[in-house]
Amino acid sequence: MKTVILQKLRKQEESSILLAERYYTILSAVNGLKLTQREIQLVAFAAIRGNISYANIRKDFCEAYGTTNPSVYNIISKLKRMGVLVKDGTKVKVNPQILLNFDNDVTLELRLVHG
């Protein structure tokens, strides 16, 4: 007979962007993606803004996080290779499989299965 342990955790975030960052941090950890903090920030930013394709959106990201446009391009390239970001026509967006509406509460169910 297998024992199932249920543990509930609750974390309140002040904004949609912080909630998105928390979600993508958890997603990275659970799936062994080893995303850096800046990569997580970019994914969260793209999720909130809808894409990371337009120059004004990239500029806003650079100003908000103190980074450069070439760094953003390198991160985008890496995240596209990993499948975290995908090209949708002319836009680079967060993969729809991991995109949530961060204006709402997020409830995660995590199952770590042995064997």
Image: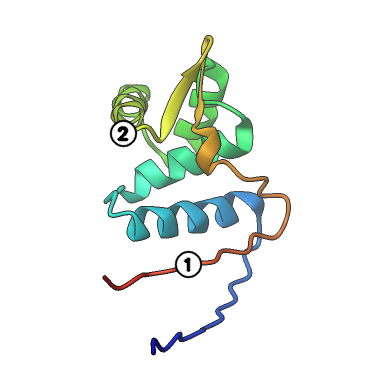
Q: Amino acid at mark 2?
A: Met
Q: Looking at the rendering, which quadrant does residue 29 occupy? A: bottom left
Residue type at tag 1 = Leu
Residue at 49% across, 33% down:
95
Q: Nearer the viewer, mark 2 or mark 1?
A: 1
Q: Which residue is mark 1?
A: 110
The residue sitting at the front extreme is: 1
Precedes in sequence: disc 2 or disc 1:
2
The image position of residue 45, as x and y in percent, is 53, 39
- Which residue appears at 52% of the width and 27% of the height? 93
35 to 66, vertically: above or below = below
Residue sitting farthest toward the right:
104
> Up-down: is 7 above or below 77?
below
Which of the two residues, 77 or 67, is positioned nearer the viewer here?
77
User: Would you say 63 lies left or right of 39 here?
Assistant: right
Under circle 2, the secondary element is helix
Q: Position of residue 98 (x, y in %)?
A: 51, 43
Name the spot of residue 109 as percent of width and height, x first: 54, 66
Q: Nearer the viewer, residue 2 or 63?
A: 2
Q: Residues within 10 Å of mark 2 (few under 14, many from 20)?
A: few
For the C terminus, the quadrant is bottom left
Instruction: Give the crowd class for mark 1: few <14, some 14-19, many >=20 residues within 10 Å.
Output: few
For disc 2, the marked residue is: 82
Quadrant of the image containing the N terminus = bottom left
Identify the secondary structure beneath mark 1: loop
Residue 61: x percent and y percent?
Answer: 49, 33
